[in-house]
Image: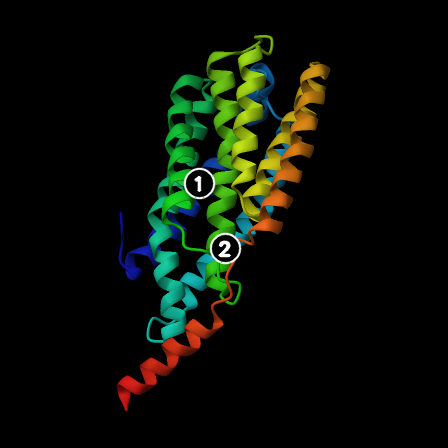
């Protein structure tokens, strides 16, 4: 799934605008996003303001990433290497924005089983990308850093979306079953134990959002367990990244690429 640089430079911002416009519709329509949320509570419902608090800074990173996508010069070897990685992510980014934006229309019409389809597509696709397609983050490359932040935060909040939307599609007002407690604990433990700081931080954030939400909705015992999961997830992320640092410093690679370009022109 690939696109050209010229296509990527238009596809990314257009999909961002579509998603942003859909979110404004969701916030300002009647009923709005929050109204639907409050009418459909499940054992995987987070505190809703955690989602809004996550998306605002995440959108700032998206804008910075798109700025680099437009600003980088493909004739410069170092910048071209950044662009290659960024362009590779664009189709996943664009489809994700389209899914999230389209989800909003079904969510606000309270067609929750249909809206859940778009969450499945986005969440699984973003996880596929960061697990199989994303190269290690180069701490000397802003393009690489921004691509990792945007893609991993997309995937990270996608996990919370996945739980939340499946919960409200099929388990509204259902007491928390044991299988949900076990799967939540095992799932987050597995993801946290294999995560870098970015995606791992998202896992902890997701659990805190669920913990606060479930306490607000009256399931204190489940909330306490989710809080314990959050502490455990933070510990797993810390140990994993201490024992196996996930990032690389590829400054030498870029210097060599630039030198090769000079040699080719001599």
**Label annotation for residue 213:** none
Residue farthest along the front direction in this orientation: 243
**First-in-chain label (2 vs 1):** 1
In this view, the residue in front, 261 or 6, is: 261
In the rendered view, would you say 65 is above or below 31?
A: below
Query: Residue at coordinates 50% horizontally, 57% vertically from top-left?
Result: 146
Residue corresponding to mark 2: 63
The front one of 201 and 101 is 201
As displayed, is residue 52 above or below residue 39?
below
Exactly how many numbered labels are in the figure? 2
Between 12 and 144, the one nearer to me in the picture: 144
Which numbered disc covers residue 19? 1
Label 1 crowd (10 A; few <14 / some 14-19 / many >=20): many
Judge left or right: residue 198 versus residue 8: right
- Quarter of the picture holding the C terminus: bottom left
- From this view, report whether residue 4 is shown above or below residue 112: below
């Amino acid at each position: 799934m690939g696109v050209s640089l010229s296509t990527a430079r238009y596809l990314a911002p257009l999909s961002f605008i579509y998603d942003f416009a859909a979110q404004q519709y969701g916030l300002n329509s009647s009923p709005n996003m929050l109204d639907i949320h409050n009418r459909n509570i499940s054992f995987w419902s987070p505190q809703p303001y955690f989602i809004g608090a996550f998306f605002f800074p995440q959108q700032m990173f998206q804008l910075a990433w798109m700025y680099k996508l437009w600003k980088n010069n493909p004739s410069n070897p170092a910048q071209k290497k950044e662009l290659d990685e960024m362009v590779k992510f664009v189709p996943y980014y664009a489809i994700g924005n389209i899914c999230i934006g389209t989800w909003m229309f079904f969510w606000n019409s309270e067609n929750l089983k249909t809206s859940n389809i778009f969450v499945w597509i986005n969440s699984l696709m973003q996880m596929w990308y960061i697990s199989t397609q994303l190269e290690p983050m180069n701490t000397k490359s802003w393009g690489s850093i921004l691509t990792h932040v945007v893609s991993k935060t997309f995937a990270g909040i996608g996990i919370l979306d996945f739980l939340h939307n499946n919960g409200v599609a099929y388990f509204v007002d259902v007491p928390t079953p044991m299988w949900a407690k076990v799967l939540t604990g095992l799932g987050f433990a597995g993801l946290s134990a294999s995560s870098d700081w970015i995606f791992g931080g998202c896992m902890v954030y997701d659990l805190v959002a669920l913990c606060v939400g479930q306490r607000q909705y009256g399931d204190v015992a489940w909330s306490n367990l989710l809080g314990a999961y959050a502490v455990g997830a933070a510990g797993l992320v810390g140990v994993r990244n201490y024992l196996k640092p996930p990032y690389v410093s590829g400054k030498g690679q870029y210097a060599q690429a630039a030198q090769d370009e000079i040699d080719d022109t001599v």
